[in-house]
Image (cartoon, helix red, strand yellow):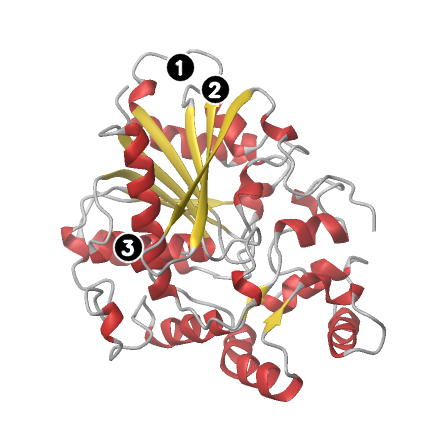
Amino acid sequence: MEHRIPRFTLDGVRDAEVTVHPFATEDELGLQLTRFRSHDTPAQGAQDDVVLLVHGLTSSSDMFIMPEHTNLVRFLHDSGFGDVWALDFRMSNRFPYTMETRRHTLDDIAQYDHPAALREIRRHVGARRIHVVAHCLGSVTFHMSLFSGAVSGIASVVANSVALTPRVHPWARLKLALGPALLEYGTGLSYLDPRFRDAPSLTRRWLLARAVSYFHPECREAACHMQSFMWGSGRPAMYRHGNLTPSTHLHERLADLNGASDLHYYRHVRKMVAAGRAVKYDTGDPRFAALPDDYLVNAADVDTPILFVTGDHNDVFTDSNIVCHHVLSKAAPGRHELRILPGYGHIDPLIGKNAHRDVFPHILDFLKRHSGR
């Protein structure tokens, strides 16, 4: 099928100087950072600040540079933050890792991916202030790195949808409990993909996609239906339809932005949901001895201010960020902030057509107050 918007396009950042920075983790995975530098001279003081953008599971750095609306990179450049980096870590759909039977957990990312990415950025920017805007399980894993001490020296963090207290709807909890085993051992599928509808007719992938679409009459896009099946509980689950441009809400475009997902990550999320907080997946694994069993154990010691952002119709991680803000505000009163976004869901605060008017100004205000301006 012809792509309406080319995959991995840079059309959304035409006015930026783009450089790519590959790096490797200590467990020998090749990952990538992309640097977007504004051609305009930054405002006084803004040159001291760097912004790192972190995607979620099945998405990629592409969610921050979409050409169909004013994207976050362009918004930050226009607002004086001229040095923006976007990370593609092992959950990125730009890599094959989420379709391989590697059985990684969120601990792998907290220990290996984010520390390696920060080392690579520091190699180029030195001691400048680094701010992070993170989404979904990219946010969970970055907070795991931050609260375990695996990364430090972060000036501020903006967490979209979820951080250290994942909470989901009852139907999503049931899917987390039963889905991985049923799919892996019942159907032989080790991953889920929004493109399953494009598989040959009568194959397991095609039949699953057809069955999912039967229960999602809210639109005609099979990729939208599969994403609701993969994440959360709703029709649709990941966003509010009206918040997306028509060119975003198309089968191929949705599948490009949010691709295939390894099923094993669900098991770690299930354990966290059951615990009510971010916890280590295997407390007996010696590889992760440096990580805490409970990532909130030293919450009061982390002095990085966090802005928790969530839509009031978040059908993936429900009120996770509201709860996390409450928990961390008890540990460190007055340090963190919360913004609840009327009419928004899980991912549309970052990929929505009007996010530059409704959401990004909140992020910008927070960054400015914690920058060198």
* SS for callout 2: strand
* SS for callout 3: helix
Amino acid on which disc 3 is placed: Ser
Amino acid on which disc 1 is placed: Pro
| Residue at x 76% of width, y 53% of height | 251
Would you call the spot at circle 3 few (<14 residues within 10 Å), some (14-19), or many (20 or more)? many
Q: Is residue 254 left or right of residue 94?
A: right
Would you call the spot at circle 2 few (<14 residues within 10 Å), some (14-19), or many (20 or more)? many
Please name the residue that numbered disc 3 is placed on. Answer: 145
Considering every residue shown, the one lying at the far left of the view is 301
Please name the residue that numbered disc 2 is placed on. Answer: 38
Name the image quarter holding residue 210. bottom right
Amino acid on which disc 2 is placed: Ser
| Residue at x 51% of width, y 70% of height | 169
Q: Is residue 203 left or right of residue 310?
A: right
Q: Is residue 22 left or right of residue 68?
A: left
Would you call the spot at circle 1 few (<14 residues within 10 Å), some (14-19), or many (20 or more)? some
| Residue at x 73% of width, y 72% of height | 212
User: Are the two marked residues, 1 and 2, in contact with CB atoms closer than 8 angstroms?
Assistant: yes
Please name the residue that numbered disc 1 is placed on. Answer: 42
Q: Residue 318: percent from the left, percent from the top?
A: 48, 61
| Residue at x 33% of width, y 36% of height | 121
Q: CA distance from mark 1 to mark 3?
A: 30 Å
Q: CA distance from mark 3 to mark 2?
A: 29 Å
Residue 301 visible in the shown view: yes
| Nearer to me, 47 or 315 | 47
**Mark sitting earlier along the chain (3/2):** 2
